[in-house]
Amino acid sequence: MKKAMLFLVCAVCGIMWLLMLKPDEPYLSPPVNPAKPDHPTFHSIEDAKPVMPFTMKKAADSEAANMAVSMQAKAVKLLHSLLSSSSAPQAPAVPQVPETPAKTVYLTFDDGPSGLTGEVLDILKENNVPATFFILGKQAEQRPELVSRIAEEGHAIGNHTYDHDYSQLYRKFTLFWDQIKQTEEIIRSITGERPQLLRAPGGTAGKFDETYFKLLKQAGYRVFDWNADSGDSKRIGVPADEIVRQSTMQTAGDEINLLLHDGAGHEETVKALPRIIEHYKEAGYRFAVLTPETAPVQFKVQSKVKPKESQPGSRWIAEHIVPNGQLFDQGKVLTLDMAGLAAEFQPGEYRIENGRLMVPLRSAVERLGGRVSWDAPSRTARVSLSGASWSADPGLGMLWSPDTSMKQPSEVMIWGNAVWIPLRDILHFSGHPLNHVVMKEHAYQIQTL
């Protein structure tokens, strides 16, 4: 573009110079006469005006001279327009048309993993399509290899409670909570990640009251219902053709959250899946997984929901809900190096009380390769770690070792349903006293002797 502009400017200058020559004379350098120049000096482009730079000697030359002056004026005007622009002439601006948001379909599968989940994953892989699996903890225990495959192949995993038992889940919130946490730990033990996505068995409509929504949100979870139902669970043996028809009826919206099932007995859903995928591709939809940032589809609380048996109290909420929300907050990670054994605690998995780092006893010991057992009659925890054995009594706030007769007070306590203990005490009684703590921007790093 710059070369083209330079060429054009040079061409215009050449035309101007030729027009300033006498018509009857050959192209020669004009005589230099500083006192009476034949050509006016242009101090700026604004000073340049269409003047006659030479004297016409013959009347016959007047017509040619006038033509020359006119051409000179046009040349100067063109040169002025070129030099007054910071760049070469631009094409007229084309009005920007707002980009249409991409239409998205979220394929979601409930009640797995089952013997059919592998086939579902094969179809998704063949079509290069991601999906979200809301997993039952009971099923995950039986088929951990499928849970691993779901995660490894880039699909999202959500929590669908442990056993899908409506009579327990919707009797009171604490029973629902226990199943969520049980399933969460099962999935974390398999994938290393805590599922933040959650789907209530049967959906929230007619089952959730305001307390369920409020406390789950406060605890950091994202509850998802659906806005398109495949109908594959309305009765046993729904045929594939019907599932396809129900799954593709609602393609008018920009976001489709489609309910499907990969649990046992849903062979027809597997048969229908390729045609469902083909339909949405042809309709111009992209496929995506649900994330904590996805705006959730949630059913409204219905007035017909029966009052729950009981509601959690403020103390229970403070001990369970509040710290759980910190699990999904961005904070400092606590890393521990104990004689070559490493453990890591995410934000919310440890607490800082009175300047002490408090950790769940069982979780900390097991991550370091040890074992913890609970003696119900004496209400004490018995610990075996790194060759040392000792006991912790939350009631008395005391630790002791039968092997070394070592005994000391401790801030060990029962918090929620877990025994919490200062991390320093675990290290000391296991023969690896804390050496130093390094605080970095995103982590606490602890090293032992």
Image (spheres, rainbow, N blue to C red):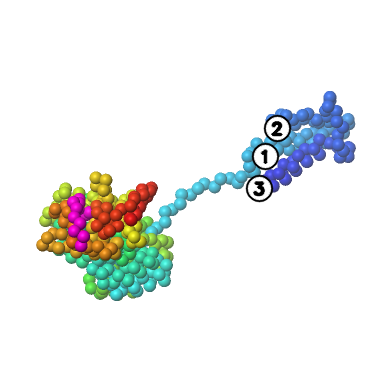
The one nearer the camera, 34 or 318, is: 318
Which circle, 1 or 3, is nearer the viewer? 3
The vertical placement of 68 against 312, above or below, is above
Dividing the picture into quarters, in which one does residue 132 lie? bottom left
- Is 416 magenta? The answer is yes
Mark 1 sits on what residue? 82
Amino acid on which the number 1 mark rests in the picture = Leu
Residue 322 seen in the figure: yes
Report crowding for label 3: few under 14, some 14 to 19, many 20 or more residues within 10 A (C-alpha). few
Q: Kindly identify which residue carries mark 3.
A: 1
Report the disc number at residue 45: 2
Q: Callout 2: helix, strand or loop? A: helix
- From this view, report whether residue 180 is shown above or below residue 241: above
Label 3: state its secondary structure: loop
* Rendered image quadrant of residue 268: bottom left
From the viewer's perspective, is 369 left or right of 19?
Answer: left
Asked whether the residues under the numbered discs 3 and 2 touch, taking CB atoms below 8 Å apart as contact, a structural biologist would say no
Q: Are marks 1 and 2 in contact (CB under 8 Å)?
A: no
Label 3 – label 2 distance at C-alpha? 23 Å
- Residue 118 image position (x, y, % from top left): 34, 73
Give the residues drawn in magenta, as a range.
Answer: 403-421
The CA span between labels 1 and 2 is 11 Å
Amino acid type, callout 2: Ile
Tell me which numbered mark, 1 or 3, is placed earlier along the sequence.
3
Label 1: how many residues lie within 10 Å, few (<14), some (14-19) or many (20+)? Answer: some
Residue 206 location, x and y as percent?
18, 58
Q: Amino acid at mark 3?
A: Met
Mark 2 nearby-residue class (10 Å; few <14, some 14–19, many ≥20):
some
Is residue 244 highlighted in magenta?
no
